[in-house]
Image (cartoon, grey):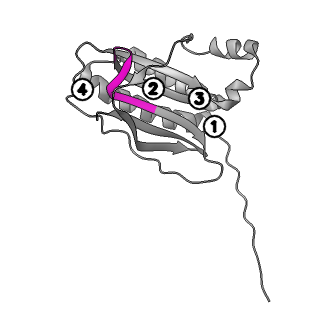
Amino acid sequence: MSQSYTVSETTTFTVTHARHMAAKVATDLKRMQRLYGSPSDADINTYETEIIDLLKAGYLGVVTYGYRRNNDWIEPTLRYTGHDLAGAGANDEDPGRIKPGANISGATFYSYLTYSAAWDKLTSDQKDAFKKTLPFYRGGAPEPGVTGYFAEDRVYSSGGRALNRASVRSW
């Protein structure tokens, strides 16, 4: 006699899950602030709110925070790529390991965001209406290049979604 069992699991992504992951991004940004002076506390709070709203709606593609010089990302810069785990598991690591001592002379702090495939399915009016609910309105801009390369170094996950973090590394 044989028996079989089927287990099914459904995870609903909530604002609590979004806040959990966004808090880790905010912690990374706070460490960057301690080491390099930017972003400000107000900016960190604004970025955190933006990420929560975008994660909850499923619209976050990639967001990058860091320093750029001559329109290229330099160390220290962090890139977060959002994705659905589709039933797979992922680590939920602690934030940190922001490289100290990088040369940021002549560089300015900047952020750049792209949206998910779910965003692309919205009408122009829906996109505009959603953007108006965010803490600030992002317009269009060319994406900066990178001096060096991005290396994945952390994963933040909750509720069936994840943010993969990558940091700029010099050649």
Quadrant in the picture for residue 58: top right
* Bounds of the magenta segment: 69-79
Under tag 1, what secondary structure?
loop
Q: CA distance from mark 4 to mark 3?
A: 27 Å
Does label 4 or label 2 sit earlier along the sequence?
4
Q: Position of residue 8 (x, y in %)?
A: 73, 59
Q: Is residue 13 left or right of residue 156?
A: right
Is the Cβ of the residue at disc 4 closer than 8 Å to that at disc 3? no
Q: Position of residue 60 (x, y in %)?
A: 59, 29
Does label 3 or label 1 sit earlier along the sequence?
1
For the residues carrying marks 4 and 2, which lies nearer the camera in this image? 2
Under tag 4, what secondary structure?
helix
Q: CA distance from mark 3 to mark 2?
A: 11 Å
Does label 4 or label 3 sit earlier along the sequence?
4
Is residue 72 inside the magenta stretch? yes
Does label 1 or label 2 sit earlier along the sequence?
1
Q: Position of residue 97 (x, y in %)?
A: 30, 39
Q: CA distance from mark 1 to mark 2?
A: 23 Å
In the rendered image, the quadrant that contains the N terminus is bottom right
Q: Which mark is residue 14?
A: 1
Q: Position of residue 121 (x, y in %)?
A: 74, 26
Q: Which mark is residue 64?
A: 2
Q: Crowding at label 3, few (<14), some or many (≥20) Cα neighbours within 10 Å? A: many
Q: Which residue ends up furthest to the bottom in the rendered image?
A: 1
Amino acid type, mark 2: Thr
Residue bearing mark 4: 35
Please name the residue shown 42% across and 47% down the image: 93
